[in-house]
Every structure is written in C-alpha cells, then in structure tokens.
Image (spheres, rainbow, N blue to C red):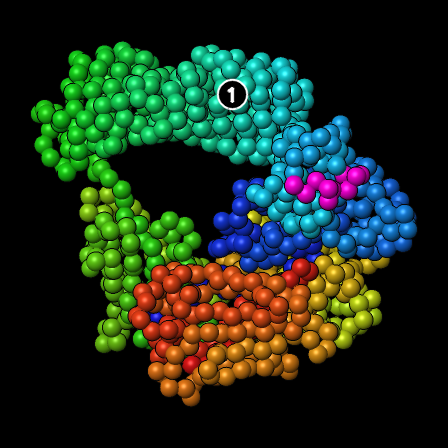
Amino acid sequence: MEFKSKTIRKSLVLVLTFAMIFSMFSTVFAAGSSDVDGHWAEKQLKQWIDNGLLNGYGEGVYKPNQTITRAEAAALVNRSFEHEETAEVAFSDVAAEDWFYNEVSKALTAGFMTGYEDGTFKPDQNITRQELAVMIFRLLDLEANADAVASFDDVDTIADWAKGEIGALVDLGIVTGYNDNTIQPNGLTKRAEAIVMIERAFEYLFTYSEAGTYGPEEGTETITHNVTVIAADVTLQNLVIEGDLLLAEGIGEGDVYLNNVTVKGTTTILGGGENSVHLTDTVLVTVIVDKKDGKIRIVVKGDSEVKEVTLNSGAKLEESDLDGAGFADVILSTEIAKDANVELVGEFQTVDVFAATVSIEIPEGTVDSLNVDQEAEGVELDLGKEGTIVELVLDAVTEVIGEGTVESVEGEKAEASDVQGEDNKVPVTTGGGGGSSSDDDDDDTPSGPAAEAEEIAFQIGGEWFAASYIDKNEFEFVIPSELTGDEYITLIEIESTSSNAKEISFGSYEVPFDGDIAEIDLLQVLNDEDDPQNDGVRVATIRGELAEEPVTLTGVLTADNGRETNVSITLFDENKLPNIEKAYVFVEGGETLEAVYNESFDEWTLTIPRGLDGDERITSIEVLATTGSVLYYDETTDFELMNFENGTDTKTVEELFEAISGYHDEDPIDSGDPGVTIQVVREVFGSGSTYEDWFVVSNDYGRTFIDVAVEIESPVGIAMIRSISIVGIEEIEYDYDNNNFTIDLSGEDGSTMIDEIVFTAADSDVETFYAGLVFEDIDEEFVVERTFDNKELTISVSELLGEFGIPDNGEKGISLSSLREWIADGTYFVYIEGENFSKRVLIDIKL
C-alpha cells in the first residue's frame, strides 16, 4: 500500500539564515541515523553531543573522521575546559572579524597554544597528533617522560619537542598507539581522535585517588565529563555530573559518600564493602553494581532517588531516613554468581529477577511488583515479617519462605512454586488464566503486555495518507490543504505489530484486528450520516468540525489478554495551522536574498549566490507569517525568535542572538560591526556546501515544524560531482542551470539490468558519499556510505542488495522493472563531503 505522507511536521521553511548562523556554535539534534552510530568513539561522541560540546552539520551528521584545524582544536578545548579569559591577539593571519579570533585568544591566555616564529598562528592548518598531545600536556601541567615512547616502532619520527610530552600522556593512557605498535605523531588528527583524547584528559582531571572531600561547600558545580573515584573515604558534594561516575575497585572495602550529587550518565560501582556507598540528597539515573568479591551495601537517605539499579553481583540496597523517591527499579541480571545474596530494605517499584540460584531477602519494606523470569530457576525468596510483595509473578519455580505478606501470585510456574507462610495463602493464578488455589475473590486485573498501535493511515478519495507518530499510541493527522473538500474520508487503517492486538473500539463501535490490521469506518466512529451513499465523510464536513480547534478521536485498544489502552488521533486542518508566506535576508552591500519554496522537498531554500564578493554583511531578516503566530528556535518554545502579531516581523542578527542567549552563552562573531559577512558563512560551511535545520512556528490552533535548507553555491564552473554513469546505459553530466542531475530511464525496457553506478567527482577534495534509502515495499531505511578513490566511486547494486538483506535471485544487479516497483519518480538527494564541506546533490529520477 502506498501512503502519501502529509504530517503536522510539514516542513514549510523559513528563517533561512538562522540555520547558518546558529550552526556555527550549536549542536544540531537530528532524528534517525547518525554518522556516529557504530563509530569506534560512539560513546564519547554522543556524550559530547548530549552535553552541547560537539556541533553538527544537520541530518545527524557530525563528521567524526574529518581532520581538524588548529583553530577548531582550540575551540574544542576551550568549549570543554570552559576557558573564557581572553587577551589581545597579534598574529598576522588572525583578524578580529574571524570566527576563531576569540578561540585563539582564549587558547593563548590559557597557555596551551602558541604561534609560530614568523608571527602567524596558522589557524586553518590541520593539526597533527603530536601537536594536539603537546596542547593537552600543557593543559594538565604534567612532567615529561620521553622513556615512555621508546618502545614504539616509529619513535624516531616523533619530534624532539614532543617526545617527553607524548610519553607523559602514554603513561596516563590518554595517548595510545595503533595496532601496529606505532604512534603516528605526524598523522593528521581526526575529530573523533581529538574528542577522545580531550575526554581522557578530563577523566584524569576528575579522577580522585586520595581520601578527602571534593566539590564546593555551597552552591553546585557542573562537570560535563566522566568522574572516577579510586580511593576509599572520598566524599563528593554539591556536584552535577553530566557524564558517567565510576566507583572503582581501588575503593576496596572502604566507604564513599555522595552528598547532593546528580549523575546524568551511568554510575558503575565496582568497589566498596558491607557499609560502603552512602547517597544523601542524591539522584542517580542508572546504576550498575559489579563487585568481583563480596557484597556491596548502598544506602539512600534524605531527598535521594535511584531510578534503575542493575545488579551483576550480590548487594544490599537500603533506604533509611528517606524523604525522596528512593530506589525505583531493580534488575538482578544473569551475571550474578551462583548462590549470591541480594537484600532489599525499603520501598521498591519493580524487581526483575533473571539470575538463577540466587537468594533474595526482603526483611522489611514493600516491593510493588517482583517478577521471576522463566530462566531464573532455583531462586529462593525470603520475606521477613515486615516485608510485603504486592504482586509476585513466577515464570520459574521459586521457593518463597518467611512470615511476610504476598498479596497476589500469578505466572506460569505459580502453582508449581512453594509459597509458604501463614500470610502467603493467597490466590495463585497461572499465566494462562487458570484456576486458583483458594475460594477467595479472584484478581480480575489482566496480566501481560498491552497492545500498541504502530501506524495509522486515512483513506481519502481512494488514496492513503499517513498520520504522524507522536508518542506511544498517540498520533496526529493533518487534513491536507490541497484537498478540495469534496473528497470523502472512508477508512482509518490502524496497524499493530505487537502481535497481541485483538480489537479497537470507539464507543460502542468495535472492530476486530485481521492479523495486524484493523480497518475503521469513519462514519461509524463519528456516528455521522453525512452522505451514507458515498460511504464516508466529506473532507469539507471534517474541516467544519476543525474550524475552531483540533479534534481528538480516542479509541480503546484491547489486547488478547484483556489489557486495554487508549489510542488517540488528533485531527488538524492544514489551512488553520500557522504558515510562513515569505522570508527575506537583507544583505548590506549586496542584493536582498529571498527564500524560494522547493516543492520537491516541501521546503524553502535560501541560496548564497556565487557572485557575492564575501565582504557583504547579512544584517537582518524579515519574515511574513500567519498573523498571531510565534516562531521558536526549538520544540521547547523556550527561545522565541519572532512574533507575528501583525503578520510580519524583522529582526537584526544581534537581536536573534539575544533571543537565544539561554541557548548560547555568547555571540562568537561579534566584531563590532552589524551582522555577519558572507565570507564568514562560506568559511564556516565551505563553498559548495548545504546546511539543513528546523524551527517551530506556533499559534493557538497548533504548530508547524519549519525546515531549512541553505545552499552555498560553488564558484562558477565547479560542481562537486561532475557526472553519474549507469554502466551500460548512459552517462549524465551535471546541469549547471538547474543545479542537479536528471536521470531519465522512462524509455528503457523493464528487463534492463542495473548493476554498477559510477560517480565522478570534479575535485580530489571529495572524499565520502552517503545516502539514506527507503524502499516502499521494504519497511526499513538503509544508510549507504562509500569512499571516493582518486575522484571516482563505483557502487555495486548487487552488493547493496546483499547489505539490505534482499535475497539474491541469481542475476547481477536489479532489473529496471523491479526498481520501478520500489521507488517512484521524483527528486532525490545524496550527500558528499570532504575535509571542509558537506554538499547535498539533487538527482531527478524518471523511471
């Protein structure tokens, strides 16, 4: 079934230059796949992204393998070490209007970078591994140790001025060699390598190896990196740790105290004794306990909260003098040693047991839900007299002893388990809904998971339009503006892939699922007799209902186990949603730039033309939009950029920076002159690059997501990709007038096989090709990434099909008839990138 997607995230686009200006110093968060996924430095990269330390290029692109310049290295270090102090810069190649002026100034003031004897700084020169190592050596104020690099095979290639510095970092594990036992000191540093090296330096700075108290006496201090404790009797106080916290084995059987500490990453506990880890007024999101020998006690006090604890070893979790939420969820993993003991004292929400042959003691307190997995055989559960389990689910045979209370027991092995004790004579229900062990009233609460709606689509005038997935069982659907109103909405199709969906009901109207699909008659939902002969409801009628405000349809989705959950579909009229009508960028010393609507991508595109000299300055932006709407920088609506009370608004670049002052600490391009020069834009993005971002325009009726595409034209006569060849069919040259390629295969026979596609670059700077492919009949998105070799890239269709998991039919490549079934005519784009640019290449395909 082919869906035409028309969602509330509509992609009308505007405030074009915002994207260019903001991206110089903000992280771009993009949904879907990212080029850091699966990268060897994925953990550190994502931590930097989450903490706002790593800027992106849009669409999930962060270029971890791109080399960095001296100026960029200075910016990375300044940002992570929070250097703010500046001084006058006197280098001949660093001007006050350069974006990196302040970064160079901060680096000089902090003392970790210097210039060259000829009076230059060489900000655009790529930085080598040994140069970055010396920078970090200076930051950490270490003692040189040249002996530490003597064992590397390429030690003779290390400059004399860097040997001792690199050796000091090797000693600390900040610099490591390659698999071939080399350091490669003269190799150019890639973005990911720099981030990992800086992160390791921070871990050294925030490694506490001596007993004592660390953190401010008053107020709070934020640490954006990882923290490690390797000694006993350490107290951390008044800290917000945005990275991970490691309580290492070096703590031994000693104690560690966390007072008013929040850890946003993962807390891993490897050391401590029977009275070891004390949490007071502390919030931990995720905790992993994994002590090799013995048992760790974790006690929470005051206004503390521990959201999830995974036990890979025995432990005692205790709440004492607690005002906060305390422990929430506890997982006993399969890593726990046989016959280990876990003790729980306090109020726990959920305890999930996957470990076999462990003993669990609950001397006092309450567990709302304790679940023993089917693989967790041989578990012994000891309930003290003051201990209570509200719901006990036994999917493996379990021995339950003690004098405590179990309010209900169910599960596949509930009847086979030994549930003893005077207060444990409770109804025992099997997972299949079988009988009980007593005549007491049965618990009618259904067990098992609820069903979930995955996709929803509306059939309008014989075509299907997809609704937008907002959250679990929550959808939004926009009535497309191009519909005349005479069309009829006939069916709503709800798809559930959770395999247990039984039926969905709207009031008294019930529809069973046929496999994973339920087809809903909209007339029945609305109880409407609009025009029964047409078997549907006119679009004009629905628009009338939506004239004042959106309408939400709520259905009850029932699983085959009886569990019910609500499914909501909020309907909007696109004609009522806020919109952007025009957008202009005013350029001092040049022509006014106007955004152009790109129907192929449902976006507006701003082009920075190649004919501008570069000295022209973008000073202000004017936008015409729906009267009464407001433009925000992101979905939180915290950063208001423009207010269209009268249908139009104009803001200077400086006013826009002030509007997002809570998002960015400073204006890095403030040179005393108004706005930002075209040359700065070109330097930041690279000539020939494409940048994309999004904003939100909102009014009392609803919101529209605003997509942005900014094209920075290459110099005259240059295209990053010169030609595309489909081997055996034709070669397509770049169309300079339309800034794209056109591949017309409509006249080719369907039996024609396509196996190899060759991309020829116009410049050796082009390094990488990548694209996201979505086939209509294959419910998955594929990301293709390839590297150019001497300006040429050959993509084998046969290899791609293998990567996509499409069975080999014995033929080489794919037939044109099969391709016609999978993709439709239209404009598609791929990305190419090099050291200093990322470019979107448009391809018009006619099949």
Q: Position of residue 41 (x, y in %)?
A: 56, 44
Of all residues, the one furthest to the bottom in this rendering is 747
Which residue is depicted at the point 24% across and 43% down?
Answer: 563
Residue 455 sits in which quadrant?
Answer: bottom left
Instruction: Give the side of residue 114 with respect to residue 830, left or right.
Output: right
Figure label count:
1
Callout 1 crowding tier (Cα within 10 Å): few <14, some 14–19, many ≥20: some
Q: Position of residue 108 (x, y in %)?
A: 83, 41
Please tell me which residue lies in front, 647 or 276.
276
Residue range highlighted in magenta? 153-162
Q: Which residue is mark 1?
A: 249
Please tell me which residue lies in front, 468 or 101.
101
Asked if 341 appears above or below 66 in the picture, the reply is above
Which residue is depicted at the point 29% across and 55% down?
Answer: 496
Can the viewer see residue 206 in this picture? Answer: yes
Q: Main secondary structure of the magenta part?
A: helix
Residue 439 sits in which quadrant?
Answer: top left
Instruction: Give the side of residue 591 with respect to residue 217, left or right.
Output: right
Residue 160: in magenta span: yes
Amino acid, disc 1:
Glu
Asked if 402 appears above or below 804 in the picture, the reply is above
